Image (cartoon, coloured by chain):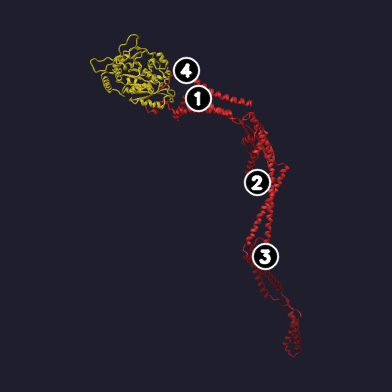
Chain colours: A yellow, B red
């Protein structure tokens, strides 16, 4: 892709330097989102910067609104809440999360959640993964809704939102951190899709994309950015985003996604250095995996 | 093994996932199949069993072999299903109402020929079955006509069988008669030829048989005569020897003359011893006496010795031997001359022996044939008498032609159920085939194997209450669709039975 190389190298050196300079524990303590008390703005959840180091990465504090997610609707729709009971699907996402973390630990911590066709469960998996990752003690998650044509992350979580990712890409005057919505779940922030344009792909491919992404990641080494994307075989943005992420998680719907669709989709993800699959909607288990019932038995 | 079990489960899972396709296919197959089953015309069958016992008294005569029995069956079948018979049947049964032109009759005849089956399972049991599925008749009409046809066939069978057997007997008798006559003539001719030949050649030698036989016999006899002759001759010569050594007369104990002479001579000797001279009167007297006695007694002594009995018996034996020898010699000479004549004849006409053998052979063959024919004729004549006098062909109807309101074929209930099962399996098969054609991934293992990309996990399907409600609704619809298929099948079977009840 037409990815600018300069900033990437720049960023890599910055990260290295950052991890050299700051100890993680410090950073973590700073990153813990404050418990929400509606109305009052929380203190900037920023790491305290050591003074007098000009080359240190600047963590831009999220300045968007703080909103409470609709836990009832989420629970109703079968999502896994970090503070909810242990469920089968929650356990499965925990396994996926561990795998994902071990995969991204080495490199780029941007993850694209994509699938071949609509209805395979991208948003479901992305939101669930985000919720599950947010429960990690030393992690924070930024869920980016990159499905510009059909943004559904906000409605799923029951958030209002305003300007979003596309606004930041299209309009240089919009600061991306102003668009990030903080939620009442500690460690979970959401970046809405923003306005709809007819040139989504072109904006995504522009050099500003990398700048925006750098800005989102700057100063947050323990942050994972999850992109919810449009279907690969239905819209082009996902394949462009794939060039900017370190890992693409291709959702395969059990009993639905066909072999040819899978091959086609995998072909579109060539730009991504690492592609992994996640089988969603499994109805058949030969091995007898049944999570969720185990915890109930102990009681 | 567990892998196989898993594969099987996965296959079932795949079919279940495409259950709507399976249901649609099953419906399609069932509808088509049921339509086809409905279009198959009913065929009604009427069966009769007939027992025919022929040749019960003389079972093995006239060569009633299994093959011939089969031929009999074929003959009966062909006779019964001949065009003339079938036409008769068409005209006399209800089929006549459905036909008007000759052409239609011909059509019905052709149809009937295929519908009539005649089989024999045992020796004399004939099964006659008629199955009709004529579209121009109602179901009941078909059943009735089938019954009528079977009835008619049984009648025809009865007539045909008896008639044929008698005609056959008569025919074979006629044939045998003509053959016997012909053979008799031939035999006579051969006999005449033989007699003429014998007159010409065979009188030369005694005995029986061919020339060669007779010559051989003559030679054998000669060979036997030769040692006999030699024995007889040697016996004769030894007899002659003995005879020569045996005196014919025995001398010895003579009375009269010989003793008087002796006493006279003794007296003379005594006189001389006394010194008497010749002139002594006594001596002179004695000498005269002796001289007289000598003349007398010498003759008496020579003629008066006793004959030797051994000599006598030897003499007679010798005569017997001589006669035997002479007879043997004569016989030998005769045989020799006969043989010589015969040999001379053979040299003159070398084919004679062969000619005689040929004549003999011809004659023998003709005679054998003739004898056999005559005995066969007698058998057949006897059998014909038996048939005509005792009515030997027994004809019994074991099962009279049946009449059934239940069609013999098709077995519609079975077919309907069969179509249903075929539909179910067809639907499942279609779903399975679809799964094979459009590969999807039910499990992580499959996905990993197919894609070659690491799979980091599997998320079980979660359903919201709305979704599960919808799914339950769909499941209900599916159950309804499947149930409707079964109900359809049951209904069709019920309709079939109701129809049967009305027919």
Is there CB contact under 8 Å for labels 2 and 1?
A: no
In depth, the one of B237 and B455 nearer the eye is B455
Residue position for label 2: B63
Residue B124 percent across, percent down from the top left: 66, 39
In depth, the one of B247 and B361 nearer the eye is B361
Residue B97 percent across, percent down from the top left: 66, 31
Is there CB contact under 8 Å for labels 3 and 4?
A: no
Q: Are marks 2 and 1 on the same chain?
A: yes
Residue position for label 1: B24
N-terminal of the pair, mark 2 or mark 3, is 2
Q: CA distance from mark 2 to mark 1?
A: 67 Å
Q: CA distance from mark 1 to mark 3?
A: 111 Å
Number of numbered callouts drawn: 4
User: From the viewer's perspective, is residue A34 above or below residue A10?
Assistant: above
Q: Label 1 is found on which chain of the structure?
A: B
How crowded pointer 4 is (Cα within 10 Å; few <14, some 14-19, many 20+) is rated as few
SS at mark 1 in the image? helix
In the rendered image, the quadrant that contains the C terminus of chain B is top right
Residue B204: numbered disc: 3
Q: Label 3 is found on which chain of the structure?
A: B
SS at mark 2 in the image? loop
Is there CB contact under 8 Å for labels 2 and 3?
A: no
Answer with the quarter of the image where residue A187 lies.
Answer: top left
N-terminal of the pair, mark 3 or mark 4, is 3
Q: Are marks 3 and 4 on the same chain?
A: yes
User: From the viewer's perspective, is residue B54 above or below residue B361?
Assistant: above
Q: Label 2 is found on which chain of the structure?
A: B
N-terminal of the pair, mark 4 or mark 2, is 2
Q: CA distance from mark 4 to mark 1?
A: 23 Å
């Amino acid at each position: 892709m037409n990815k600018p190389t300069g900033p990437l190298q720049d960023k890599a050196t910055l990260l290295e330097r950052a991890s050299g300079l700051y100890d993680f524990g410090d950073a973590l303590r700073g990153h813990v989102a404050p418990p929400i008390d509606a109305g009052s703005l929380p203190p900037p959840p920023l790491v305290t910067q050591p003074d007098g180091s000009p080359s240190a990465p600047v963590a831009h504090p999220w300045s968007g609104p703080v909103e409470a997610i609709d836990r009832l609707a989420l629970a109703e729709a079968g999502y896994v809440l970090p503070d909810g009971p242990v469920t089968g699907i929650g356990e499965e996402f925990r396994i996926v999360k561990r795998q994902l973390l071990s995969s991204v630990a080495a490199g780029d911590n941007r993850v694209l959640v994509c699938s071949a066709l609509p209805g395979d469960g991208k948003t479901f998996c992305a939101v669930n993964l985000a919720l599950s990752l947010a429960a990690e003690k030393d992690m924070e998650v930024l869920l980016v809704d990159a499905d510009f044509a059909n943004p559904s992350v906000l409605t799923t979580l029951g958030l209002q939102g305003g300007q979003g990712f596309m606004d930041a890409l299209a309009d240089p005057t919009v600061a991306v951190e102003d668009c990030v919505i903080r939620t009442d779940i500690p460690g979970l922030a959401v970046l809405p899709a923003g306005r709809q344009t007819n040139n989504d792909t072109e904006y995504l491919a522009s050099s500003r994309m990398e700048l925006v992404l750098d800005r989102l990641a700057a100063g947050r080494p323990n942050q994972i950015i999850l992109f919810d994307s449009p279907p690969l075989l239905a819209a082009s943005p996902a394949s462009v985003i794939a060039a900017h992420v370190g890992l693409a998680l291709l959702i395969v719907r059990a009993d639905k996604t066909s072999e040819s669709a899978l091959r086609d989709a995998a072909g579109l993800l060539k730009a991504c250095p690492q592609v992994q699959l996640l089988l969603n909607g499994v109805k058949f288990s030969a091995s007898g995996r049944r999570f969720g019932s185990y915890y109930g038995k102990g009681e | 093994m567990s892998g196989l079990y898993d594969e099987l489960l996965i296959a079932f899972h795949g079919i279940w996932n495409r259950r709507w396709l399976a249901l649609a296919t099953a419906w399609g197959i069932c509808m088509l199949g049921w339509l086809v089953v409905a279009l198959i015309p009913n065929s009604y069958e009427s069966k009769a069993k007939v027992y025919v016992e022929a040749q019960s008294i003389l079972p093995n005569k006239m060569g009633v072999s299994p093959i011939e029995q089969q031929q009999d069956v074929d003959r009966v079948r062909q006779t019964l299903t001949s065009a003339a018979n079938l036409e008769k049947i068409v005209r006399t049964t209800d089929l006549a109402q459905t036909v008007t032109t000759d052409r239609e009759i011909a059509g019905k005849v052709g149809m009937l020929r295929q519908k009539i089956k005649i089989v024999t399972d045992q020796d004399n049991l004939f099964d006659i079955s008629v199955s009709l599925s004529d579209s121009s008749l109602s179901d009941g009409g078909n059943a009735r006509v089938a019954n009528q046809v079977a009835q008619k066939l049984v009648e025809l069978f009865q007539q045909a069988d008896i008639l044929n057997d008698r005609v056959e007997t008569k025919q074979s008798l006629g044939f045998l008669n003509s053959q016997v006559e012909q053979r008799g003539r031939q035999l006579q001719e051969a006999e005449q030829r033989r007699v003429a030949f014998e007159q010409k050649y065979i009188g030369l030698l005694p005995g029986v048989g061919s020339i060669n036989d007779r010559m051989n016999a003559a030679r054998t006899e000669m060979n036997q005569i030769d040692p006999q002759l030699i024995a007889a001759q040697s016996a004769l010569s030894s007899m002659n020897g003995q005879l020569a050594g045996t005196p014919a007369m025995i001398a010895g104990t003579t009375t009269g003359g010989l003793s008087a002479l002796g006493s006279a001579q003794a007296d003379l000797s005594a006189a001389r011893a006394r010194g008497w001279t010749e002139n002594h009167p006594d001596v002179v007297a004695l000498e005269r006496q002796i001289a007289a006695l000598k003349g007398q007694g010498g003759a008496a002594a020579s003629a008066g010795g006793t004959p030797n009995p051994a000599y006598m018996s030897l003499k007679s034996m010798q005569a017997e031997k001589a006669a035997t020898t002479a007879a043997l010699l004569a016989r030998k000479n005769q045989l020799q001359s006969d043989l010589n004549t015969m040999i001379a004849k053979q040299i003159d006409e070398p084919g004679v022996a062969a000619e005689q053998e040929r004549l003999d052979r011809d004659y023998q063959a003709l005679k054998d044939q003739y004898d056999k024919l005559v005995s066969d004729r007698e058998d057949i004549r006897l059998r014909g008498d038996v048939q005509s006098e005792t009515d030997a062909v027994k004809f019994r109807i074991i099962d009279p032609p049946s009449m059934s309101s239940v069609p013999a074929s098709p077995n519609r209930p079975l077919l309907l159920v069969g179509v249903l099962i075929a539909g179910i399996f067809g639907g499942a098969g279609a779903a399975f085939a679809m799964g094979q054609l459009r590969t999807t991934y039910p499990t992580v293992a499959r996905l990993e194997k197919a894609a070659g990309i690491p799979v980091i996990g599997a998320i079980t399907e979660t359903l919201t209450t709305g979704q599960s409600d919808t799914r339950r609704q769909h499941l209900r619809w599916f159950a309804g669709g499947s149930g409707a298929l079964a109900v359809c099948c049951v209904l069709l079977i019920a309709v079939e039975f109701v129809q049967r009840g009305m027919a």
